[in-house]
Image (cartoon, rainbow, N blue to C red):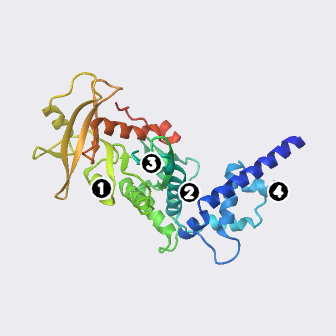
């Protein structure tokens, strides 16, 4: 019994030392200050943050920590609650700054300069069926199970070099439709980040995605391409992402309602496919064409690659790249990074046909 207690104490001390080294190496204190997380007097914010960080890795709640007396915080529990309720903290900026520092200091030096780093957009269901009093809780359509559930859509932006995946920032999306929201947001100062975050959660997913990408661009996260699936691949989104400064590689829906300019005419991807001769043999792709993505009279060139669907041999998938200099096989390879590094939760919730 005494040995197990001693071992547990040693593990806690080792975890605490590792966390302190992490906080020091990546300058967490300055990242918190840059995100408006600071106090004019009293316990420094970084100490409260360090304590919460320790609770997660020691697999212990604050309640049990106070009851057992193991790793007491050194300050009142109300200090922690006030910190967690601070509406002026910009958590999107904080996680983005932290990801940028980790990438530049710990990962990028190990990568080749020719490696194509990417940002990945993914959304998955964040179910909260038993939390009816949560702010902005909504009835959200679960595309995996084709039914409405109580919860949020968790929109996540991640970074990958093909071997490592690192979350950059995220936002929980409620519903634009007031009828689908179970609870409305609490009244907070409209000048605060908390108020803006609540407004962000009620925007369309495509608009919220652009906000996350702008934060990543401002933090100078090294990435050339943004990868996303067909839910986000519309002409307006492609133009918006290009205006931020990224090229796009994404899957596009085969729908007769979406048009691209090909040979001077606006056509759907289905029509373009039927007009052209396909590649034979065991090639990974069936057809590759250059189109113009037109929005409000402005056109950007893009390469559309028609890929064999492994799951259904008689069908095909469409990939689009706004970098027309990329080889077709390279487009397929880079887009494959999206499925290789998806968050584990999303792997269980979403399934899209494999490419290649």
Q: Is residue 38 above or below residue 147?
A: below
Element under label 2?
loop
Q: Is residue 146 visible?
A: no
| Residue identifier under label 1 | 242
Left or right side of 42 for 122: left
Quadrant for residue 50, please give it: bottom right
In what quadrant of the picture does the N terminus appear? top right
Circles 4 and 2 in contact, beta carbons < 8 Å: no
Residue beneath the point at 45% across and 37% down: 340
The disc, 1 or 2, on the residue closer to the chain's N-terminal end is: 2
Residue beneath the point at 50% across and 53% down: 103
Circles 3 and 2 in contact, beta carbons < 8 Å: no
In what quadrant of the picture does the C terminus appear? top left
Left or right side of 226 for 153: right
Between marks 3 and 1, how big is the CA–CA gap? 29 Å
Residue beneath the point at 15% across and 29% down: 277
The mark closer to the camera, 4 or 1, is 1
Q: Could you say which disc has been placed on residue 134 in the image?
A: 2
| Residue identifier under label 4 | 69
Between marks 3 and 2, how big is the CA–CA gap? 14 Å
Circle 2 packing at 10 Å, graded few (<14), some (14-19), many (20+), is some
**Coordinates of residue 275 in the picture (x, y in percent):** 13, 33
Circle 1 packing at 10 Å, graded few (<14), some (14-19), many (20+), is some
Between marks 4 and 2, how big is the CA–CA gap? 31 Å
| Residue identifier under label 3 | 140
């Amino acid at each position: 019994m005494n040995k197990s207690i001693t071992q547990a104490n040693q593990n806690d001390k080792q975890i605490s030392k590792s966390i302190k080294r992490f906080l020091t190496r990546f300058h967490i204190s300055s990242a918190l200050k840059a995100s408006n997380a600071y106090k004019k007097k009293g316990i420094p914010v970084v100490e409260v943050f360090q304590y919460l960080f320790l609770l997660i890795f020691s697999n212990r709640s604050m309640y049990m920590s106070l009851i057992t007396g193991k790793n007491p915080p050194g300050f009142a529990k109300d200090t922690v609650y006030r910190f967690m309720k601070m509406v002026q903290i910009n958590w999107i900026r904080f996680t983005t700054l932290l990801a940028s520092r980790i990438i530049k200091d710990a990962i990028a030096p190990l990568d080749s300069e020719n490696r194509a780093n990417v940002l990945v957009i993914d959304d998955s269901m964040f179910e909260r069926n038993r939390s009816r009093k949560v702010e902005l809780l909504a009835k959200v359509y679960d595309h995996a199970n084709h039914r409405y559930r109580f919860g949020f859509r968790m929109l996540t932006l991640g970074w990958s070099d093909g071997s490592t995946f690192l979350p950059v920032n995220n936002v929980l999306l409620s519903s634009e439709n007031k009828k689908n929201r179970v609870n409305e947001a609490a009244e907070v100062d409209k000048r605060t980040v908390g108020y803006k975050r609540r407004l962000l959660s009620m925007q369309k997913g495509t608009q919220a995605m652009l906000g996350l990408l702008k934060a990543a661009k401002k933090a100078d996260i090294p990435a050339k391409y943004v990868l996303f699936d067909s839910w986000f691949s519309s002409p307006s989104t492609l133009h918006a992402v290009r205006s931020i400064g990224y090229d796009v590689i994404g899957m596009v829906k085969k729908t007769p309602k979406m048009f691209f300019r090909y040979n001077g005419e606006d056509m759907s991807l289905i029509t373009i496919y039927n007009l052209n001769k396909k590649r034979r043999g065991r090639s990974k792709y069936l057809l590759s064409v250059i189109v113009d993505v037109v929005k409000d009279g402005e056109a950007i060139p893009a390469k559309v690659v028609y890929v064999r669907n492994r799951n259904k041999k008689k069908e095909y998938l469409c990939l689009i790249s706004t970098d027309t200099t990329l080889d077709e096989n390279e487009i397929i390879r880079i887009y494959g990074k999206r499925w290789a590094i998806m968050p584990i939760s999303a792997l269980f919730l979403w399934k899209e046909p494999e490419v290649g």
